[in-house]
Image: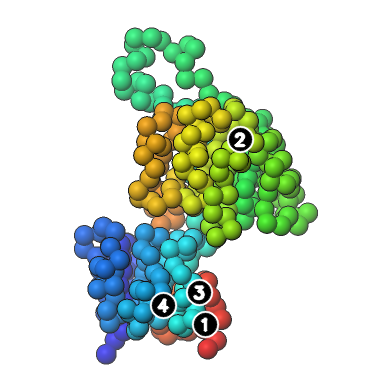
Amino acid sequence: MRPSVLVTRATFPDIANRLREHFEVTDNPSDTILSPSELIERLQGKQGVMSTGSERIDAALLDACPGLKAVCNVGVGYNNVDVAACTARGVVVTNTPDVLTQTTADFGFALMLATARRITESERFVRRGEWQKTGIYNQMLGSDIYGATLGILGMGRIGQAIARRAALGFEMQVIYHNRSPLTPETEARAHARYVDKDTLLREADHLILVLPYSPEAHHAIGAAELAKMKPTATLTNIARGGIVDDEALAHALRQGTIAAAGLDVFEGEPRMHPDLLALDNIVLTPHIGSASVNTRRAMAALTVDNLIAALGYGPQAGQPPTPVNPHVLQR
């Protein structure tokens, strides 16, 4: 009897069909987020799951689904998965690094530009008919990107890609903070300079968050950090929602502590803090940093490669390309 796997969200049919060469595949025909109880129900008798960041894979689920052997996440982030619980039960976890670096960097830069230049606010102004009533000369004045100082919190692959765009394309001065500085050679390629976190907050005209989520990073940007930023500064978050205290951010935007924010991720998404929705000086997008056709195809293909290999099939049987907890494979 062939193994069974669950695909929690719709994906590209030609890529999903590769799973059917090896497994019995159960899809989610509604293509909506499965509740915890629905997810447990559909994982009964399954050995693998192709999951997204919307599904919580925790100890309770693993205990309810003892046959599960592989959790293959579509995305570089995996804070929806309790990796320690998976590891303790011998469940391999995989993600999709590298393939989304450039498109996410593009999106992060676009979101920063839209925030600084008040693009979505200006569109709403036009749609309301305000342009015809008042003109625009002294309205919708934003802040420059070209020649400004960009601060990057988190300097992995995506952070470095953003830094190169900023320095080479917009002649920005790029400073960054990371758990540890990059090597001098990597810094030179990124055209970026390491500073401590307080300096980053004080000096950045535009601050972009690209760090991975961890318990230590929870609310890394809160009221105290926002108070250290320039009142003209913007904040862009393409990392994870829990890194920013959304309530503190909403208060800072209302009070003029900082000028504007652009958020692609939210704490508790798809729910979000209601105060954010009431603000004009914020750009909100629904976690679409990697949402280009080519990139999402590459992510899906890598996830399928991981799932096939993790369950012992294909040319890389037993050795998925991008495991998060590779030591499980040695057991």
Which mark is first along the chain, 1 or 2?
2
- Amino acid type shown at disc 4: Ala
- Of tags 3 and 2, which is closer to the observer? 2
- Amino acid type shown at disc 3: Ala
Q: Which residue is mark 3?
A: 84
Q: Secondary structure at mark 2?
A: helix
Mark 3 nearby-residue class (10 Å; few <14, some 14–19, many ≥20): some
Q: Secondary structure at mark 4?
A: strand
Residue pushed farthest left?
29
Q: Which residue is mark 2?
A: 227
User: Residue 69 sits in which quadrant?
Assistant: bottom left
- Of tags 2 and 4, which is closer to the observer? 2
Classify residue 157 as left or right of residue 33.
right
- Amino acid type shown at disc 2: Ala
Residue 318: % across, % down: 48, 84
Q: Which residue is mark 1?
A: 328
Q: Is residue 303 visible?
A: no
- Of tags 3 and 4, which is closer to the observer? 3
Q: Which residue is mark 4?
A: 70
Tell me how far mark 2 sits from mark 1, CA to CA. Answer: 44 Å
- Of tags 3 and 1, which is closer to the observer? 3
Residue 279's tag is none
Which mark is first along the chain, 2 or 3?
3
